[in-house]
Image (cartoon, rainbow, N blue to C red):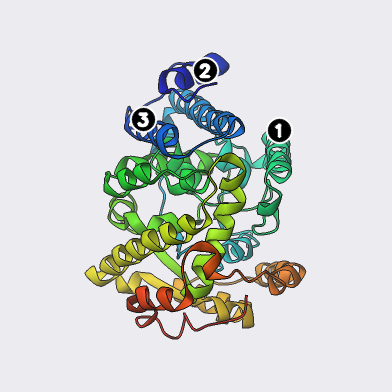
Amino acid sequence: MTLDVGALVAEARRRTGLDDLGPDTWQEGLTALVDSLNSEAALTAQGEAFHAGQIVDQLAARLEFERSWAEHPEIADEQIVAPLVGLGLGRTGSTALGFVLAQDPGRRVLRTWEAWFPSPPPEKATEHSDPRIARTRERVEAMWRDFPGYREMVPLDAEGPNECVYLLAFDFRSQLFESWGRIPSYGAWLFGCDMTPAYRYHRRVLQMLQWRCGPKNWFVRSPPHLHAMTALDAVYPDARFVQTHRAVEAMIPSEAALFSSLLTPLTTEPDLPYLGRHLADVRVECLRRLLAFRDAGNADRFFDIGFADMQADPMGQVRALYAWLGEDLSDVAAERMTAWWDANSRDRQGARRHEPETYGVTADDLRRRFAFYSERFPAFTRTSRG
């Protein structure tokens, strides 16, 4: 299928037999994305097919979501109260933190199968046997087959926690798409657009997911929140934030390697130096926006965790987080968290180191450009192994 907005929308409607895509805020982002993919990404035939499939899947899931929302208008009465939002640049340990917090049976996380297929509304009785779990496992296996390098870098499980960047993608206002293609004009549009409609959609999805499948004590996470804190705050004014940190000379090359594992097989013009330079530019802007938000009277809403500290004493960091939240950490949750960390620590400790020069940057340049960040959080951004 060609990357044409009209054709992609028509295919999603044909596949689902549905027509209503809800609020029309999705159109601007989808148009910007498709234009950028066609003009800048230098896609292979596989790349075109992949992106077309991803977009149709996203549109189809949105169509199905709108049908469920219309069938159950009472979902709109659900309240999302004081969600805990995980922030921090990519490769700072946020994924591991998400898996650890997901071990608490009293905390609600966004599971991969729910992020990809949020409707119909999940049911508590079938949350571990829902047929969408098997469907998600099939998609994960396909990703491992098509992008083997990605498997080595990020844990991904159908029933495990995932980033809520997927929920923002339902409105096509999401940095998710940049991980699959070189699309700088879409990125420029994204950083200049109003993200509020995407966060309103984000909230609607959480409302549907918790309606019949609690608990309602949400933890959601995604590095891309950094550039849109004002919009996030407008939709979730009582949100609290946990920010993960890491030395930038390790963080940026690791994130560039992650993007490369996804993007390179889809383009005729792989450009590793572009990835490092682009990510450095984007992450500097993300952090400047985040710090401006923190400094605008929001500092007390943040809890900070350093990558090295989490590696050295994960449960000490988790206990401190729970104390800051004013929540009890049950013995069951602590035991499950410790077991998950112990079972997965060997892979983390053996993680590859990625040289900055491979991705068009140097450690010295990264330290210089991000000095405003590392000097602000020296205890959390010290150089560490990994």
Observer-nearest of 86 and 52: 52
Residue 196's x, y, as percent?
Answer: 30, 44
**In terms of sequence position, does the residue under pointer 1 or pointer 3 come before the other?**
3
- Quarter of the picture containing the C terminus is bottom right
> Residue sitting at 39 percent across and 38 percent down?
77
Looking at the rendered structure, the kind of residue marked 1 is Pro
In this rendering, would 219 be left or right of 27? right
Q: Residue at x 65, y 62 (%)?
A: 103
First-in-chain label (2 vs 3): 2
Q: Of helix, strand and loop, which one carries label 3?
A: helix
Name the residue carrying label 1.
131
Residue that mark 2 sits on? 11
Three-letter amino acid code at disc 2?
A: Glu
> Residue 285 appears at what percent x and percent y?
32, 62
Q: CA distance from mark 2 to mark 3?
A: 16 Å
Q: Which mark is residue 72?
A: none
Which element type, helix, strand or loop, lies under badge 2?
Answer: helix
Residue at x-position 43% and y-position 59% = 279
Say what amino acid the circle numbered 3 marks.
Answer: Thr
Q: Secondary structure at mark 1?
A: helix
Mark 3: few/some/many CA within 10 Å (<14, 14-19, 20+): some
Proximity of marks 2 and 3: CB atoms separated by less than 8 Å: no
Is residue 222 visible in the rendered structure shown here? no
- Residue 181 position, x and y percent, is 50, 43
Q: Residues within 10 Å of mark 1 (few under 14, many from 20)?
A: few
**What quarter of the picture does the N terminus occupy?**
top right
Q: Earlier in the sequence, mark 1 or mark 2?
A: 2
- The label on residue 31 is 3
The answer to which image quadrant residue 290 occupies is bottom left
* Total count of labels: 3
